Structures are given as C-alpha cells and as structure tokens.
Image (cartoon, grey):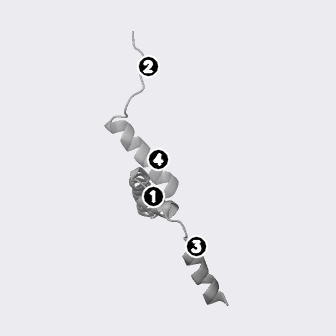
C-alpha cells in the first residue's frame, strides 16, 4: 500500500517549480528578484546578530546622571 508523504522536492519537482517561476516572472525579472531576496536575507541576518548582542551603549546612558553642577553650567550659558 502506498502512503502519501510530503518531503523535500526532488530534482524533477524543482525543475517544474523553476519553470513555473520563469513563466510567471520572466527571464529579465529573475535576477532582480534573487538580488532583492539576497539583500533582504542579509539584512535579516544582520538584525539577528545585532539583536543578540548586549546593549552596552544604552546601559551606560541610563546609568549616567546629571549632577547639580552640570545644571548650573547650562543655566549660565542660556542667560
């Protein structure tokens, strides 16, 4: 008895999918589509790397407080 199993497409299925994509978008649009897909994938990976890094700059800004002498200096320059 044969069972219907879904898995990774084989060589023949990939060729059929590629042919359908070629018919839908045309040969001139495919390099542009693949280029934009590559750029968006690169930006996604860059965002993932930046998201996993600790935010040291923001922590330092939150810890820094304005002392009363700094406020007095700013009032003198405004006047």
Tell me, for residue 40, which label it has, or none: 1
Q: CA distance from mark 4 to mark 1?
A: 23 Å
State the residue position of label 3.
Answer: 68
Which of marks 4 and 3 precedes in the sequence? 4
Q: Residue at left 42%, top 51%?
A: 48
Tag 3 near tag 4, CB within 8 Å? no
* Quarter of the rendering occupied by the C terminus: bottom right
Q: Residue at left 45%, top 58%?
A: 40
Q: 41 or 36, which lies in front?
A: 41
State the residue position of label 4.
Answer: 20
Q: Residue 33, position in %: x, y?
A: 46, 59
Which of marks 3 and 1 precedes in the sequence? 1
Q: Residue 53, position in %: x, y?
A: 39, 53
- Tell which tag, 2 or 4, sits nearer the viewer: 2
Q: CA distance from mark 2 to mark 3?
A: 75 Å
Q: How many marks?
A: 4
Q: CA distance from mark 2 to mark 4?
A: 23 Å
- Tell which tag, 1 or 3, sits nearer the viewer: 3
Which of marks 4 and 2 precedes in the sequence? 2
């Amino acid at each position: 008895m044969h069972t219907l199993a879904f898995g990774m497409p084989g060589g023949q299925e990939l060729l059929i999918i590629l042919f359908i994509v070629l018919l839908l978008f045309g040969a001139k649009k495919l390099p542009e589509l693949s280029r934009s897909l590559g750029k968006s994938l690169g930006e996604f990976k860059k965002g993932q790397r930046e998201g996993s890094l600790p935010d040291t700059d923001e922590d330092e800004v939150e810890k820094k407080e304005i002392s009363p002498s700094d406020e007095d200096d700013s009032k003198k320059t405004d006047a």
